[in-house]
Amino acid sequence: MTIRAKFIGAGHLKHEFPHSTCIVPISVGQEYHEGEKFEAAIDLINRSQFKTCTIMVCDLLQRHNLQIYDENLDDKTASEKMVQEGKAWLERNNEYINRLEIPHFVDTWDTWLKKKSIMSDEF
């Protein structure tokens, strides 16, 4: 079975894609961001001819989900676990990310928050 991704209801925006940045938020641990399904998303991005693409690995953000299922899990432990899960996701999916035919960037929630904190300290 071949998996193919498509945009639904975005036909009127396609003319803007070559001038736009595609941002792909990754929910670490979700089946739809793994393997063939993620590969299909990468293929869609390539077909859509965006100017650039940012893959945002929402690692640290997922700590809240862990704590929903395990109320005894403290924030520090959940955070550390999800940062490791984000790194593991990047290792598993790096081959697909490298198939992007446009300039692309990979960021993580953890790194983005640290950058944002540094920026706000400058003001």
Image: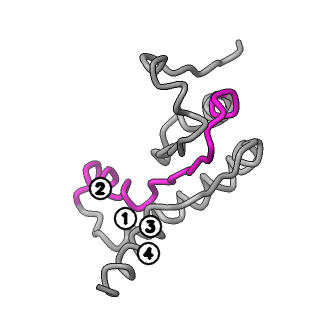
Q: Is residue 19 left or right of residue 100?
A: left
Q: Amino acid at mark 3?
A: Trp
Where residue 106 sits: x, y (%)? Answer: 60, 57
| Residue behind mark 3 | 112
User: Quarter of the image holding residue 71?
Assistant: bottom left
Mark 3 neighbour density, 10 Å: few (under 14) some (14–19) many (20 or more): some
Going from N to C along the chain, the mark reached first, 4 or 2, is 2
Question: What's the amino acid at mark 2?
Answer: His
| Among numbered discs 2 and 1, the one appearing first in the sequence | 2
Q: In the figure, is residue 22 to the left or right of 73?
A: right
Pick the front one: 50 or 108: 50
- Asked if the residue under mark 1 is in contact with the one under mark 4, i.e. CB atoms within 8 Å, the reply is no
Q: Where's residue 118, x and y in %? A: 39, 82
Q: Which residues are magenta?
A: 44-71
| Residue at the spot 47% in from the left edge and 46% down from the top edge | 25
Nearer the camera: disc 4 or disc 2: 4
Q: Is residue 9 left or right of residue 19?
A: left
Residue 83, placed above or below residue 122:
above
Judging by the rendered image, the residue that carries numbered circle 2 is 64
Q: Which residue is mark 1?
A: 78
CA neighbours of label 4 inside 10 A, class few (<14), some (14 to 19), many (20+): few
Residue at the image point whose x is 34% and y is 87% from the top: 122
Q: Are marks 2 and 1 in contact (CB under 8 Å)?
A: yes
Find disc 4 in the rendering and name its residue: 115
Instruction: Name which quarter of the figure residue 19 lies in.
Output: top right
